[in-house]
Amino acid sequence: MNLPEINTSLFTRLRFILVETSRSGNIGAVARAMKTMGFSDLVLVNPRFADALCDPEAVAFASGAQDILAGARIVGSIAEALEGCNYAAAVSARLREFSPPVTAPRAIAAQLAAGTELHAAVIFGNERFGLPNEIVEQCNVLINIPANPEYSSLNLSQAAQVIAYECRVAALGDFQAASPVGFQGDAASLAQVDGMYGHLQEALVAIDFLDADNPKKLMPRLKRLFSRTGLETEEVNILRGIARHILVMAKKPR
């Protein structure tokens, strides 16, 4: 199964902006969070140390996402960071008296995925001080991650991971829900499954587990059980192999 085209999707329309980040490790960790969810557009506004993108701690915490660091940009103002964007969302655990409408990660992710005309930025503040009011007030929405009210402060990269994950799920939509987990073989045909049921019934009769004259609802229940699994051809073959062996053993003298 091929992935859907993402060149015009949220994966290329969403920008992550970090404002005045204090720890290079957090920049690397955000890059990693972005890459694991399929995002790549990273902009830093006035990071609080030199060589933020190539600092050894940033590279170490990126852990394989060095390409995100290599493609990131450092700018001197939020206005520069937002160039090319027509929608901005601030991320903050602290609600403000004068702020844009407050939303949750899942809700904003759905909105951004559906709004194909939106070239959006998600803005994260400094680890200690968060985002200044003047930046929050410029944004369209304020994202508040629903966390434990007694301890609602997430690490910068954790917050970025939550947002990136919700955006990925929203962007992939039904495809994500339908994606197989692990290896998936060829689906068994109806004829193959029906043949397996007949073979299995014969084996169950042979070992007196099923009374052919009074079968009740055993086979319909077994059919319902297997129908929930989405049987593959190889799995049907395994079950028929088991039935075949049962029949062989049932014919042997006891």
Image (cartoon, helix red, strand yellow):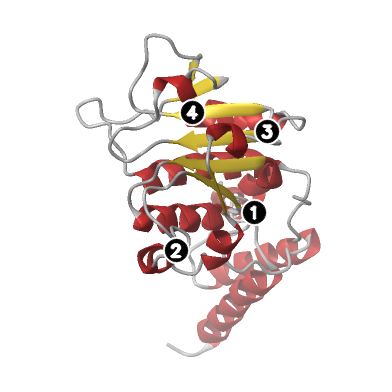
Amino acid carrying mark 4 in the image = Ala
**Do we see residue 59 in this rendering?**
yes
Q: Tell me where residue 162 appears, x and y as whole percent.
A: 45, 42
**Residue 196 horizontal side relative to residue 68, left or right:** right
- Residue ID for mark 2: 62
Disc sitting over residue 147 in the figure: none
Which part of the image, by quadrant, shows the N terminus? Answer: bottom right
Distance of mark 2 from mark 1, alpha carbons? 27 Å
Evaluate if marks 4 and 1 touch, with contact meaning CB atoms under 8 Å apart. no
Classify mark 1: helix, strand or loop. Answer: loop
Of mark 3 and mark 2, the one earlier in the sequence is 2
Label 1 Cα crowd, 10 Å radius (few <14 / some 14-19 / many 20+) = few
Q: Tell me where residue 86 appears, x and y as whole percent.
A: 69, 28
Residue for point 66% across, 62% down: 197
Amino acid carrying mark 1 in the image = Ser
Q: Is residue 198 above or below residue 226?
A: below
Disc sitting over residue 85 in the figure: 3
- Residue ID for mark 1: 179
Q: Nearer the viewer, mark 3 or mark 2?
A: 3
Evaluate if marks 2 and 1 touch, with contact meaning CB atoms under 8 Å apart. no
Dividing the picture into quadrants, the one containing residue 99 is top left
Q: Nearer the viewer, residue 76 or 137?
A: 76
Amino acid carrying mark 3 in the image = Cys
Classify mark 3: helix, strand or loop. Answer: loop
Amino acid carrying mark 2 in the image = Ala
